Every structure is written in structure tokens, then in C-alpha cells.
């Protein structure tokens, strides 16, 4: 259970008692004035991620040249196993670091569509799922003569299990949902939903982009069949770092992904014969992996593992508790409303607030060195990264937000949202 943290608590006291405070120095901060609350979109660079990329360039690539592939070739599997055991509750040989989240989602959803019995022609998702997920599922459905059934979810409170249960049945091949909603941070009950989906005979695919590195996940215990997720948000592996995919061991021989590349071919270097995919999770690989990216993920996973995902979640809950108290005490009177579940335990690592001038306030915050992000419609997301954000960061950010709105500073900014937001 999380205890409330009153709004008038001195944040320096909370920082002094913070067991993860020492991890802040593991990240590059040359703009020490900026309060960065957007680690849920792009984590700050850890020193060791840069060191890992430089090691690949300056030592492995430079000195070993092509011979380095003798060890590089196993790296996406090794790092997948590291990630699996340290924060996903998956077994060795179930997680692979490869491609992007979008591509991995395409591979796994297509594999299910291909294997589904003829009577199961529906893919279920929700209208609050991340747009790329919805587009990819629409494409897979079109290619397999299936349909997507999209249930409605409240954008502040997340998936309604009853609405989902009503939409899943004998015609359903696959259900795909985000574990932590990208906009509100609402956490879906992975075990209960997976059980319900299995009872209908469908498979369950979880998108873990906003969970991995932030919220403990137990894929084995929850019974999940498939999962995907990215490494550049809470894992801090860098812009566009390769994503991961998870295929439950028992399903690996039953599913075949649609992109038949040479890295999933048995006897890859024989350079001959017809496609015959590797058994195991290797069958879900495609072409040459970006080794600098995989090495970055390795270092990033190591850093999160050192802190421990349970300690990260504990601090995340406390940062959220403190921020919620400050929002209630200082921002609601200025027109902000909470756009995340009120119950902290049902919220991932970020807190979202609504304000009719959210875009302009966000621009004014940037001008005052407080970086959150804007999400449609009229929402500001504040991502709290337990490894580098302090309680003092949150105290300062809320003061800046209150000061901006109290003075009407946001009115000086163009109300039309920019292209990247
Ligand atoms: C960030 C995010 C993605 C991003 O997918 P990419 O292929 O990396 O662009 C997908 N799904 C969710 C839920 C996300 O939050």
C-alpha cells in the first residue's frame, strides 16, 4: 500500500530518505536547470548506454571487424533473457530484442491471424490503445480477411473489463491491449483479462511500452501469450533503440511470423534451401540486428536491474502520491483536473492532468525549463522517472505550472499544437 504524502511535506526531506537517489548521477545532465518529466516518451541518457555504444564502435567494430559477429549474433537473445528475468517474469528463450514495437506487433498479430481456426475472424482492441497498435491491427485484419472489433475505453480510467468480456467470444482470435495506457497511465489487470480471454479460446497480446522498466510485470504468472514493448521510454536505451517481443514457450512452435528473413532461418549461413524457421523465439527474428542499439539496451537493462524493478515501482508510487497531493492543493483551483485513475495503485509511472489550455501551458513550461508532454485532447503528461527524478523536481514543476496559469503566461503562446507533440 502507498501512504499519502501531504502537499506541505518538505521535498528535500523526501529526497534525503530516497533509497534510489544515488541513481541520478548515472545519467547525463548537462542542462541541470531543466526538470525533465518526459522519461515516459524518451528516457534521459544513462552514461553507461553511451559507454556501451562507444565500446561497440571503438573496440568491437574497430578491432574485431567482421569477426565480432561471432559474439554479436547471440546478443539479441542474451539481452532478451536479461530483460525477461529482471523485469518481465519470463523464462529464458522467450524474449528477443529485435525490430521496433510496431514491427513486432505486426509479426505477432499476423502469426496469430495465420494460425487461427477459420471460425475465429475477429481481433479485439480498444479505442484508447496507442494509434500504431490500432493501425497495425487494422492492416493485419485486412490482410487475413478478419475484422477489428474496437471497444470503447474511458481515456482517463482505462479498459473496462466488462465491456471487454462482452466483446470477446467464439469468433475472437486475438485480443491486443496496452498494459499501461499511454495517455492516462491506467493499469489494466493483466491476469484477470488474460484469463477471461483464454476462457473464450482466444490469445492475448500485451503491449508493454509504458510498463517495462516502470511497473513489475509477470508474464508467466499472468498467463500472457504474447507481448511487445519498447526500450526507449522507461528503459532509457535511446531514441529508436530496438524493441522486444515475447512469445510464450508453448506457443513458439505453433506460430509462424510473416517476415521470413535469414536471421530466423535454420542454418542461416548455408545460404541455400527453402525457408525453414528456427525453433524457439529465434524464429521471430528477421534481418541483421542493429548491434549498437542492442548493446544500448543491454546497458539500460543492467542499470534498471541494479536499482530493481520493485524499488522503482515503490518510488514511482511515492512520486505519484506527492504529485497528486500537490495537484489537488495547488492546481485544481486553476482549472486543472486529474486525467489519470484516482487510485494510485491503478496508475503506472505518469500522471496526466487536463486543462483547456494544455498545449499553451506546456509551451510556457518549456520556456521555464520544465519538460512534460502534451497529449490530445487538452492533456499534459507528467512522467516521473524514479531513477533520475527527485521529489524536489516535482515540487518545482508544480510551482512553475501554478505560476504560469496564475499569471496567464500561457496566453502568449500560439494555441495551435505543433507538428511533434
Ligand atoms: C511508444 C509506443 C509505441 C511505439 O511504437 P514504435 O514502433 O516504437 O514507434 C507503441 N505502442 C505503445 C503503447 C507505445 O506507448
Image: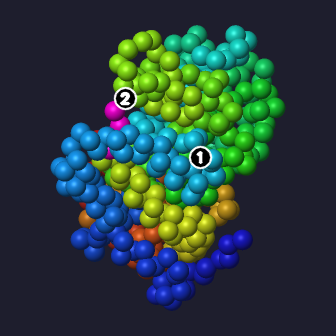
Foreground mark, 1 or 2, reads: 1
Q: Secondary structure at mark 2?
A: loop
Q: Is residue 238 visible?
A: yes
Q: Which residues are magenta?
A: 286-291
First of labels 1, 2 by sequence position? 1
Quick check: is 408 in the magenta stretch?
no
Label 1 environment density (alpha carbons within 10 Å; few <14, some 14–19, many ≥20) = some
Q: Is residue 227 visible?
A: no
Look at the image and tell me in which quarter the N terminus lies. Answer: bottom right
Query: In which quadrant of the rendered view does residue 400 lie?
Result: bottom left
Label 2 environment density (alpha carbons within 10 Å; few <14, some 14–19, many ≥20) = few
Quick check: is 290 in the magenta stretch?
yes
Query: In which quadrant of the rendered view does residue 236 lie?
Result: bottom left
* Residue 63 position in % (x across, y down): 19, 50
Residue indicated by mark 2: 287
* Residue 90 position in % (x across, y down): 62, 48
Gap in angstroms between the C-alphas marked 1 and 2: 22 Å
User: Is residue 413 depicted above or below 194 in this figure?
Assistant: below
Q: Looking at the picture, tell me which residue is in the foreground, 77 or 1.
A: 77
Residue indicated by mark 1: 92
Q: Which mark is residue 103?
A: none
Q: Looking at the picture, tell me which residue is in the foreground, 260 or 208.
A: 260
Query: In which quadrant of the rendered view does residue 313 lie?
Result: bottom right
Amino acid at each position: 500500500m502507498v501512504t499519502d504524502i501531504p502537499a506541505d511535506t518538505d521535498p528535500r526531506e523526501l529526497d534525503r530518505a530516497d533509497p534510489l537517489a544515488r541513481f541520478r548521477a548515472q545519467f547525463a545532465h548537462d542542462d541541470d536547470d531543466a526538470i525533465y518529466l518526459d522519461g515516459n516518451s524518451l528516457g534521459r541518457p544513462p552514461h553507461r548506454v553511451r559507454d556501451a555504444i562507444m565500446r561497440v564502435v571503438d573496440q568491437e567494430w574497430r578491432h574485431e571487424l567482421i569477426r565480432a559477429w561471432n559474439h554479436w549474433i547471440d546478443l539479441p537473445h542474451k539481452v532478451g533473457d536479461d530483460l525477461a528475468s529482471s523485469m518481465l517474469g519470463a523464462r529464458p528463450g522467450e524474449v528477443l530484442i529485435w525490430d521496433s514495437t510496431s514491427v513486432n506487433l505486426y509479426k505477432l498479430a499476423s502469426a496469430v491471424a495465420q494460425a487461427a481456426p477459420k471460425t475465429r475472424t475477429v481481433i479485439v482492441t480498444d479505442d484508447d490503445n496507442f494509434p500504431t497498435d490500432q493501425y497495425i491491427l487494422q492492416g493485419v485484419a485486412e490482410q487475413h480477411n478478419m475484422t477489428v472489433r474496437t471497444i470503447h475505453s474511458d481515456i482517463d480510467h482505462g479498459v473496462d473489463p466488462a465491456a471487454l468480456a462482452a466483446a470477446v467470444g467464439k469468433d475472437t482470435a486475438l485480443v491486443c491491449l496496452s498494459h499501461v495506457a499511454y495517455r492516462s497511465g491506467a493499469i489494466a489487470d493483466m491476469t484477470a483479462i488474460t484469463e477471461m480471454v483464454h476462457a473464450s479460446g482466444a490469445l492475448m497480446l500485451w503491449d508493454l511500452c509504458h510498463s517495462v522498466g516502470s511497473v513489475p510485470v509477470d508474464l508467466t504468472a499472468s498467463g500472457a501469450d504474447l507481448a511487445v514493448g519498447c526500450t526507449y521510454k522507461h528503459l532509457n536505451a535511446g531514441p529508436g533503440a530496438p524493441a522486444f517481443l515475447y512469445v510464450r514457450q508453448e506457443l513458439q512452435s505453433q506460430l509462424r511470423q510473416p517476415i521470413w528473413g535469414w536471421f530466423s532461418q535454420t542454418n542461416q549461413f548455408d545460404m541455400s534451401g527453402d525457408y525453414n524457421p528456427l525453433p524457439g523465439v529465434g524464429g521471430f527474428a528477421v534481418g541483421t540486428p542493429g548491434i549498437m542499439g542492442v548493446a544500448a539496451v543491454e546497458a539500460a537493462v543492467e542499470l534498471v536491474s541494479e536499482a530493481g524493478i520493485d524499488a522503482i515501482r515503490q518510488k514511482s508510487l511515492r512520486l505519484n502520491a506527492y504529485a497528486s497531493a500537490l495537484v489537488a492543493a495547488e492546481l485544481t483551483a486553476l482549472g486543472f483536473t486529474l486525467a489519470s485513475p484516482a487510485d494510485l495503485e491503478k496508475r503506472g509511472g505518469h500522471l496526466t492532468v487536463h486543462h483547456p489550455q494544455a498545449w499553451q501551458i506546456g509551451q510556457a513550461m518549456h520556456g521555464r525549463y520544465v519538460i512534460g508532454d502534451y497529449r490530445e485532447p487538452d492533456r499534459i503528461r507528467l512522467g516521473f522517472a524514479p531513477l533520475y527524478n527527485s521529489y524536489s523536481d516535482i515540487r518545482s514543476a508544480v510551482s512553475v505550472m501554478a505560476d504560469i496559469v496564475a499569471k496567464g503566461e500561457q496566453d502568449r503562446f500560439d494555441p495551435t499544437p505543433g507538428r511533434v507533440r
